[in-house]
Image: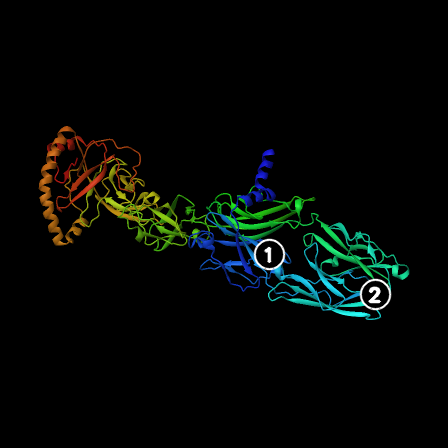
Amino acid sequence: MAQTKAHRKKRQVATFIVLMVLWEAGSESIQYSVLEETESGTFVANLTKDLGLRMGELAARGAQIVFKGNRQYLQLDPHTYDLLLNEKLDREELCGSSEPCVLPFQVLLENPLKFFRAALQVRDINDHAPKFPAGEMLLKISEITTPGKIFPLKMAQDLDAGSNSLQSYTISSNSHFHVLTRNRSDGRKYPELVLDKALDREEKPELRLTLTALDGGSPPRSGTTEIQIQVLDINDNAPEFTQELYEAQVPENDPLGSLVITVSARDLDAGSFGEVSYALFQVDDVNQHFEINAITGEIRLRKTLDFEEFQSYHVDVEATDGGGLSGKCSIIIKVLDVNDNAPELTVSSLNSPIPENLPEMIVAVFSVSDADSGHNQQVICSIDDNLPFLLRPSVENFYTLVTEGALDRESQAEYNITITVTDLGTPRLKTQHNITVLVSDVNDNAPAFTQTSYTLFVRENNSPALHIGSVSATDRDAGANAQVTYSLLPPQDPQLPLASLVSINADNGQLFALRALDYEALRVLEFGVGAVDRGSPALSSQALVRVLVLDANDNSPFVLYPLQNGSAACTELVPRAAEPGYLVSKVVAVDGDSGQNAWLSYQLLKATEPGLFSVWAHNGEVRTARLLSERDAAKHRLLVLVKDNGEPPLSASVTLHVLLVDGFSQPYLPLPEAAADAAQADPLTVYLVIALASVSSLFLFSVLAFIAVRLCRRNRASWVGGCSVPEGHFPGHLVDVSGTGTLSQSYQYEVCLMGDSGTSEFKFLKPILPYFPPQGIGREMEENPTLPNSFPFG
């Protein structure tokens, strides 16, 4: 708690202490002067030279002229920065009767903050003539009045000051009176009429004189009034006051009708000549605040007093008896100050908005004042503790509101600052002034993507210019600094034609596929996108975009075996003694798609004799469904359908030829259909194929014969369908063929050559099955280890 109070004391500024120190420490004030009523725009001074600054420094540092009360009596030339008169000045309006008439001001410079004290003196010109309150005065003088008697007269008023103010009075030429010019306590001059020669009512009962008031101007101005003197019959004594000068004190907040003072005069005459009545001697704008009781002499308040307007009043009271003789006294009424004025705050300069990120920026320049006096005039100025601002006192009750440190618009873009000014009177009065300060944006934040990486999905075979997704970046700045432009970054692989694949909308970050994508050619597309704001300097950021191409079922299954190229196909030989489930062949196919689009299933679509053969749905193996008999036809044609699992499903078909043989003793003959197809082939193609096959066959015959002899010596071989297959165990589980066409290790390759057609096929994925032929056939194999149309291929 104690620390909080101490902190608040640091934030508060006591004017009556700090300003005295600054006044003594500050540089001497620069004085300028102009005549009142000078035309606006008149040159006053070369401010750059007077302040000892470089040419152009006033403009660079944002010079300002600050007067108290937010009045701008002077201005800076926008080109030369000379000091010019901003308006025609009236000294009497600005300062009244005070002399000299000095208007203090300050020259405020920024970056760094500095004040120069200066003052403008408005010199008086003789633009007012003396003026009497009335055009005629009446004096009643007894004929027995002795010479030397003084009679006070009402004074004239001149609004000018100094030598141009009222200086003297004169009276028209006469043999009875002369006039004297006297100085009053407040500095004003008043006339007194002196009797030089005794009056004789029978000789001249009335006199008329002209009183002239003269000022000290060049040429002098004057004002006149007429004095009417009535000579009275014998009245021995004039009224006399008990005091020639009375003094009284009145608090300024006394109510109307309050008694100020009571004056008293007596007259030694008897009867009506001894009866005294009281009246204010001269009623003008100054002493009209008071009224007097003509009988009792009580002076009371007629109008409210204001210490800040007049601190004292000089009132003259006249006492007149029944014979017309009078006497005069003076009263000095001092007004006592009470704390009835709250402090006033006047903002001379306000900078809003102010840029962020700059410390000690000048936000406002203001002045504080209190119309009271003494202790009631001393003030304390403060702001809230939780704001990043400081109050710095200058001279002559001026303050600057500056930022304590760099502001951050993104944290807070607007501040409401309450400046509290409290006086030290009793009771304490305070004034609060609210200032709204906006923080302008500086481009100090780069755009930030909502994600560091984006994953988008697009199905292959898309339509061109398809919207595939969006990226988004936000910028915490404002205005143009927050406007983001998107672009594609150059790909790391210079061979990637990114610009022809995708595009981005520069305004909203929408991504488009410019052409149809092919999953089989491009499965993943990675590239960078950039976001740059429009600030100065421009700031940017980037994010990674990964486009995953989803597979569509756009590839039909492709049959690898048996080959279907329009020429004679390999015929599968099946012994009639084969058991049910005997493996006849295997249809091998692949699908260029992926996932479930590449899952293949096999189906026997058509057969020469239904029910004799079956196709396993998962691996395409063609097996016998029952025991074979002599009644079964020797030649069979099977149509196998291969179908993927896509939506919609795609399929392919393959024709398989099967020949039933008795113990493999029948020679292998091609099917008529195959021969017919071969005959219809292009003769040139056939010749080329025969030529190539002949050359290749000579080499392959030699190599394969050598390999066959070696293998037959080592292992007994089982001959199925005219092809040589090593013995081996075949696993019972299904074989999965991936979308890439990779084959299981449970299969090996074999070559089937067609002896009569001159063509050959490359056949693979033949399962390894154990087979034990009859004994006779086994001996036949030993005698003829090599069949014409079958060569083992390791």
Q: Quadrant of the C terminus?
A: top left
Which of marks 1 and 2 precedes in the sequence?
A: 1
Estimate how packed mark 1 is, as few (under 14), some (14 to 19) or many (20 or more) residues with alpha carbons within 10 Å: some
User: Where is mark 1, residue-wise?
Assistant: 101
Q: Quadrant of residue 144?
A: bottom right
226 left or right, relative to 398? right
Which class describes the residues within 10 Å of circle 2: few (<14), some (14-19), or many (20+)? some
The residue nearer to you, when weighing 773 against 173, is 173
Q: Quadrant of residue 177?
A: bottom right
The location of residue 251, given as percent across then percent down, is 74, 49
Q: Secondary structure at mark 1?
A: loop
Describe residue 478's horizontal placement relative to residue 689 as left or right: right
Q: Foreground residue, 102 or 784?
A: 102
Q: Is residue 450 visible?
A: yes
Disc 2 to disc 1: CB gap under 8 Å? no
Query: Which quadrant of the figure contains the N terminus?
Result: top right
Q: Is residue 35 left or right of residue 299?
A: left
Q: How is the image coloured?
A: rainbow
Asked whether 190 or 1 is in front, the reply is 190
Residue annotated with mark 2: 143
The disc labelled 1 sits on which kind of residue?
Cys
Q: Residue furthest top?
A: 714
State whether residue 646 appears in this view. no
Q: Count up the numbered dots.
A: 2
- Cα distance, mark 2 to mark 1? 49 Å
The amino acid sitting under disc 2 is: Glu
Label 2 SS: loop
Would you place residue 382 above or below residue 294 in this image? above
Q: At which x and y percent is residue 474?
A: 44, 48
